[in-house]
Amino acid sequence: MKSRSAIVWTFTSMVVGVVFVSEVGAQDAFQSLAPMTVVGSKEEAFNSAGSVAYVTMEEIRQAGGTGNVNSVLNKVPGVYVREEDGFGSFPNISLRGADGTRSEKVTIMEDGILTAPSPYSAPAAYYTPRVARMSGVEVLKGSSQVRYGPQTTGGVVNFLSTPIPEEQEFYGKVTLGSYNTWFGHTHYGDTVDTDAGRFGYLLELHGGLSDGFRDIRNSGEDTGFSLFEPMLKLAFEPNTALKQRIEFKVGYTDYEANESYTGLSEQDFNDDPNERYAATKYDEFTSEHWRTYLKWILEPSDAFRFETAVYCNNFSRNWDKLDQVNGAAIHQQILTPGGVSTLNGLSAGGPIRLTANLRDHEAYGWQNQANFRFETGQVAHDLAVGLRLHYDQLEGRQYRTTYTSTGLGDFNFVNRTATVGTGVNETFATAVYVEDKIEIGDLTLTPGVRYEFLEMDFRPEGGAKQSVDENLFMAGVGANYSLDDQNSIFGGVYQGASTPSPQAYLGGTDNEESTGYELGWRHRRDHLNVEIAGFFTDFDQLISTDAGQGLNPGSAANAGQAEVWGIESIIQYDAGEAANLEYGIPLYVSATWTSAQFKGTTPLLAGGGDQIYAGGKDGNEIPYIPDWKLAAGVGFEAEKWGVFLDAVYSSSSWGTGYNGDVRPGAPTARDGKIDSLLVFNLSAHYQLNENIKLLAGIDNIFDEQEIVSRIPEGPRGNAPRMVYAGLEAQF
C-alpha cells in the first residue's frame, strides 16, 4: 500500500503544481475540450506511429439493419470476429491472432473508460457496447499500447458514444425487418450559452426487438431478444480564467434473449442450420448494466492538458442454459443418436440438466492523464503521464434445474437445487504509464512504459480468502516517418500482457505475455488511401480460456507458446470523384493473411480436455484464426441516393487446438472445421427531403449459411438472409 500511496502522491503533486504555474496562461488554451480518444479521426490515423483504424459514424450506419458489431469490424484488417447468435450480441473479437473468445484478450472501452464488466477479475465480456448507437469505433492493433490496459497482448477497441451537439439537434432512426426484427435509435441535444458558461445536454434511447431466426422444435417459443438502452450526457464549460470542461454520463442496458449454448449435430445442421433442439426452450439470458462517469478536463495553456475521470460500472446477468443430458456434457451427447433423441424429447428418460450461472460484477475507478508539450532545441515533445486506480470484482452464484424427457416431444420438471455461491474474485489494480511523442522533423517516435501492480483475491464460498500480488512491466516504441505529403512508413516493437482471473492465478495459471513487431506503409492522395502492414507476435504462457466452455471458474490454463505472422492491408478509392463526376463511386478492399500456430504446447492441453486449445501441439493452428479474411465493397452515391454492395469472405479454420474432426478417446462436437464463408450484403438510401432519409437493405443476399462456431456446445451457423427497411430523420 505504501508504494501505491507514493505513486498517487507524486502524480497528484506534479499535476497540481503544473496547474498552478500555468493558470496565468489560460487565455492560450486549446480551442477544443473534447475528451481524449485512442485514435481521434481518420486524419490522425494516417499519422499514427502504429497500425490503427477509425470507423466513422457513416460507416457504422451503412453496415446493415441489425446493428451487428461484427458487420462493422469485418471491414477492419487485422481484426477477426466470430459470430455466435447472428445479431452480434455476444461478439468474439480477436486482434492479430490473440484468442477472441468473449473478446477477453481485448481492452474494451467506451469513451476511453473500461466498460467490460470486470476487466481484471473476469475479462471475458458478456457485455459489449452496442455499435449501432455509436458515433465511431477506434481500433488500436499495433505499437505502442502502453496507455491502454489491462489486455495488451491483443489490443484496444474503443467505442465512441453520441457526442453532445454544438447546436439543437434531433436524430431518429427506425428499421423493421425479417423475423419481426426492429431497431430504433433516437437522441436529442443542444448546447446553450449562459452567464455562467456553456451548458450541453444529450438524451438518447436505443433499443430493439426480434423473434429470432432459429426455431425450437415442438415449441412455440421464439429465439429472439429485447434490448432497451437509454443514456443521459451533460457537459458544462464555466466562464472562468481556467479553461475547463466537466462532463457526466449515465447509461443503462436491459437485455433479454432466448439464447442457448447448445448447437446441433453435424447432420442436423446440414438438414436445417436454424433449428434448435426441443430441450433448449428453457434457455434464457438476462442482463442489466449501469455505466457512468464524471470527467474533468482542463487546459491551462498550450503546454499543458489534464483529464481526470471517476467511473462506475455494475453488471448483473444470468444465463440459464442446458449443460448436460444423460449425465454427460452437451458437446459430447450431440455426437450420439441417443443424446440427440433425448434433447428433442423423443426418448423417454434423461436427466436433462440446466445450470443457471448468476454473475454480479462491480467495477470502480479513477483515471488520469496529463499531457506536457515542450521543446528541447529542434525536438518537440508531447509527454503523456497516466495513473489509474481500478477495483473490480465478480461474485458468482449457481443453481441447477433437472427435467426428464417424456418421449413424446415434451419434458417433465424434476427438481431445482438451492442457489449456492461459487466464490468471489476481486482485483485492485494500480496502473502507471509514461509515453512521449517525439517529433524530429519528419520523424515521430513514441516510446512508452507501463507498470501495473495487481492485488488479487479469491474467496471461495464458505472458505478463507486467498491473496496474491503481481507486478507487470510493459514497454514499447512506435515510429512514423513522413516520406512526403502522400507517403509515410511506420513500425514498432511492443510488449503485452494479459492476466487470468485471481482464482485461476492462485490455481497456477500464469500471465500471458507477448512481444509484437510491425512494419507498414501508408499512402494518401485526394481519392486514394492505401495501408499495408506486416506483423509478428511471439506469445508466451498462452492462456487457454475457460470462458463460454461450461467449465468451473478459474479453470483457465497455460498452453505454452505461439507465433503469429500476418500481412494486413486496405485500399480505399473513389472512382467517381477521381474522374470529376457528379456522383461518387467508392470502392474498398480489406485483406488480412495470418499464420497463427502453436509452439511448445503444454502436455496438459495436448492430452485433451474441454478448453479451446485442447489437443493442441506444435505446428497446429490456433482455433478460429483463418488464414484469410477479405472484405470488399463498391457503392454508387448521387446527391439524393446511394447503393452499396459489400462482400465478406473468411477461409476455414479449426474449432479447437486439436485441428481435426474426431479426437481419439475424447470425442467432442467442439472439434472440427469452421467452414469458409462468403456473404454479400446490399444497402441503399434515398434522401426524401432535407430532413428525411429512406433506408433499405438485404443482409446475406444469397442466404449462405455455414458453421461459424462450435463453442460453447456444438456447431451453429451465421444468420440467414434478412431484409430490412426504415427511415432516418434529422432536424
Image (spheres, rainbow, N blue to C red):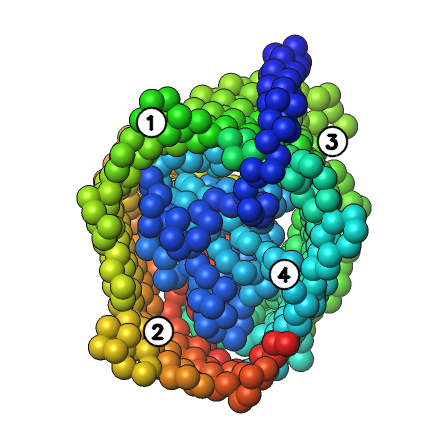
Residue 708 location (% of width, % of height): 40, 63
**CB of mark 4 within 8 Å of CB of mark 1?**
no
Considering only order in the chain, which callout, 1 or 2, is on the residue closer to the N terminus? Answer: 1
Q: How many numbered circles are shown?
A: 4
**CB of mark 1 within 8 Å of CB of mark 3?**
no
- Give the residue at mark 4: 166
Residue type at tag 1: Val
Considering only order in the chain, which callout, 2 or 3, is on the residue closer to the N terminus? Answer: 3
Q: Secondary structure at mark 4?
A: loop
- Give the residue at mark 3: 461
**CB of mark 2 within 8 Å of CB of mark 4?**
no
- How far is mark 4 from mark 1, CA to CA? 36 Å
Considering only order in the chain, which callout, 4 or 3, is on the residue closer to the N terminus? Answer: 4
Residue 92 location (% of width, % of height): 47, 53
Q: Which mark is residue 379?
A: 1
- How far is mark 3 from mark 4, CA to CA? 52 Å
> Foreground residue, 316 or 340?
316
Question: Would you say residue 454 is visible in this rendering?
Answer: no
Considering only order in the chain, which callout, 1 or 4, is on the residue closer to the N terminus? Answer: 4
Crowd class of label 2 (few under 14; some 14 to 19; many from 20; radius 10 Å): many
Q: Nearer the viewer, mark 3 or mark 2?
A: 2
Quadrant of the frame with the N terminus: top right
Residue type at tag 3: Glu
Residue sitting at x 41%, y 84%:
639
Q: Nearer the viewer, mark 2 or mark 1?
A: 1
- How far is mark 3 from mark 2, CA to CA? 51 Å
Give the vertical position of 588 relative to 561 (above or below). Answer: below
Q: Secondary structure at mark 3?
A: loop
Residue type at tag 4: Glu
